Amino acid sequence: MSSTSELQNPPISEQEVALGFEHENLEGWIPPLATQEEICDAMEKAFDFRGDVTITLKAGSKIEGYVFDRRSAPTLQQSCVRVIPKDSDEKMVVPYSEIAALAFSGRDTAAGKSWEAWLRKYWEKKSAGETNIGIEAEALD
């Protein structure tokens, strides 16, 4: 019979491990924006993307920058994306209804930086006999 402490804290080999999820490689992707659903889906992906995107407005101008927020609403006129332009600290609000095109133009700085990737590198270093292996962030370039 197991003790109460074993039930509360099972050995690591028996603990449930939640796997991460695989991110789509969106670098260079230009999504179709023909329907409201496609526009909303693309803006969600732009929000999750950890690189710059280029938004072409229906008026013809372009905004290249980082999407840090988006607000979904029942209509494209009410929905908007918030962007920090590449060469500015200004925060811009762009209604979905003004967006003509979207391109994932920057490098995804989070690509390949998952917990599983870090763990794999850690065990490779440990197997090679390296010591003083710690959790330090890699340079983003």
Image (cartoon, rainbow, N blue to C red):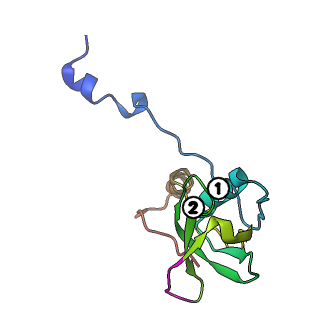
Foreground of the two, 81 or 30: 81
Q: Tell me which amino acid carries mark 1.
A: Cys
Is residue 11 visible from the viewing direction of this image? yes
Quadrant of the rendered image containing residue 81: bottom right
Label 2 CA crowd tier, 10 Å (few <14, some 14–19, many 20+): some
SS for dot 1 = helix
Q: Tell me which amino acid carries mark 2.
A: Ser
Quadrant into which the C terminus falls: bottom right
Q: Position of residue 2 (x, y in %)?
A: 25, 15
Q: Earlier in the sequence, mark 1 or mark 2?
A: 1
| Part of the protein shown in magenta | 88-92
Q: Position of residue 28 (x, y in %)?
A: 76, 68
Does residue 2 sit above or below 39 in this rendering? above
Label 1 CA crowd tier, 10 Å (few <14, some 14–19, many 20+): many
Asked whether disc 1 touches disc 2, contact meaning CB atoms under 8 Å apart, the reply is: yes
Quadrant of the rendered image containing residue 111: bottom right
* Residue 79 circle label: 2
Quadrant into which the N terminus falls: top left
Q: Position of residue 129 (x, y in %)?
A: 50, 58
Q: In the displayed structure, does residue 80 sit left or right of residue 12?
A: right
Q: Which residue is mark 1?
A: 40
